[in-house]
Amino acid sequence: MPSARPETTLSALVARVAAGELSPSEVIGGALERLDAAEPGIRAWVRVDRDGAQGAARRLDTAPAAGPLRGIPFGVKDIIDVRGLPTECGSPLRRGRVAGSDAVLVDRLRRLGAVPLGKTVTTEFAYFAPGPTRNPHHLGHTPGGSSSGSAAAVAAGVVPLALGSQTAGSLTRPAAYCGVAGFVAPVGGPLETTGFTGLSATLDAAGLLTPTVADLRLAHAALTGADRLPGPVAPPARPTLAVWPGTELGEVAADMRAALARTVEDAVAGGARLVELDWTERTPRLVDAHITVMAYEAARSLAAEAAHPDRLSTPLNELLARGRSIAATDYRRALSVAERERAAMLALLGDVDAVLGPAALGPAPSGLAATGSPVLSRPWQLLGLPALTVPGHRNGAGLPLGLQLIGHPERLDRLFALGHAIEKAARAGTDNEGTDNGGIESRH
């Protein structure tokens, strides 16, 4: 069963290359070997740029100076441009459209010394129609959507870093289902979406997927121009958490509720303070506003594609039709809800370190015809807040159960520290008992 293998985490590979234990060519060669072994089962990749990656690695082998991510392979969701490769967005309408330049994030990673290994599978235009990717933990279960290929490639240990995106639950859900760490950047923040094929300008956000939360912290620091890569994650001192069960939005599975309860129990035992909030009226209102904004803007972003309904999936045709039917006054009303509630949530996050809740309704559902529900991500995506998916829990069948932390966009160090502590305890509990367990300080 896949797990965060120490030798393939981003942190470990960066350290080994920096120490001279591995050359960039050896790192890229190892990634390609793992890809060849995993790909027949998981089908995470649309296109592998084998020659391009090996050539870049050879140049980095002899480069007198290179960035802190020298030789690190990464995957790129196929709505994100990579120079010289097609950006096909999971649709026949974009087949063969070669990007003339890199997306800003891809270019930034190259300048840091990282090497794009290829393009990973996305759902059709980052919406609901699934691609061929399977969940590495159980090939009969969905990996989620729409950053399915990126999450599966990281979960299978092929790459230690992959780029994704989120408009509803497109990164949080696959991270949770595949048992990897995921970071959804604040909308309009320093992780730019220039070079992404967008669905909704108000909601689209860039995202990162890595094996562990510590790896997310490292990647984010490198991408945002830190003078040096961060050292070990310091444990948070007496965090304050607002616990959100999410049950007003859908039926949260019993094993997911248990994972959240154990994390809360151990957080309290470790000194955390809890804030109880009743959001049974707030979050459904946010979900409704999110759906309105997403449909309205998608209908305009994909207006040219909507002229070819026979080449679009039924779910996407339905989204675009709904968007065309929404009145401008209703759209503006939804935006005003987002603005008002964001201000209220930022005020709350000035007093608490994070909102802690389930990242999905449960483990990855069986079957490949659908990608699961994004409902537990919609409220936070409407507000444009950073979301951290924390891996480490599993249910009795071995399927991952991800939790999510929603934080303040100006307090990301605290968010990463909390996520690391929760993940560390969850993995310790799982390793000890073989099933889900753990929290900030695992006592099970």
Image (cartoon, grey):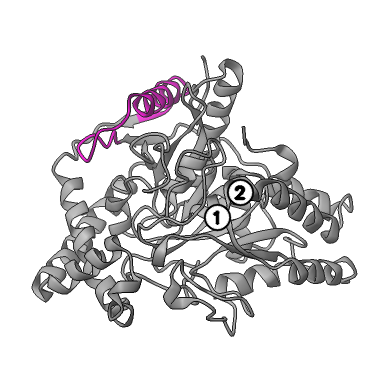
Residue 64 vs residue 429, the one in the foreground: 429
Residue farthest toward the front in the current orientation of the protein: 310
Residue farthest toward the bottom in the current orientation of the protein: 100
Label 1: how many residues lie within 10 Å, few (<14), some (14-19) or many (20+)?
Answer: many
User: Does the stretch in magenta take in 173?
Assistant: no
Name the image quarter holding residue 385. bottom left
- Residue 66 in percent (x, y) is at 79, 68
**x 53%, y 35%: residue:** 138
Q: State the SS at label 1.
A: helix
- Residue 438 in percent (x, y) is at 50, 23
Residue 175 vs residue 315, the one in the foreground: 315
Q: State the SS at label 2.
A: helix
- Residue 276 drawn above or below residue 221: above
Q: Tell me the CA gap for discs 1 and 2.
A: 6 Å
- Residue 245 drawn above or below residue 109: above
Question: Quick check: can you spot residue 418?
Answer: no
Number of numbered discs on residues: 2
Q: Is residue 57 left or right of residue 189?
A: right
Q: Which mark is residue 150?
A: 1
User: Does the stretch in magenta take in 253?
Assistant: yes
Provide the residue designation for mark 2: 154
What's the residue type where badge 2 is placed? Val
Contact, mark 1 vs mark 2 (Cβ under 8 Å): yes
Q: Is residue 209 left or right of residue 311?
A: right
Q: Which residues are magenta?
A: 244-273
Name the image quarter holding residue 363. top left
What's the residue type where badge 1 is placed? Ser
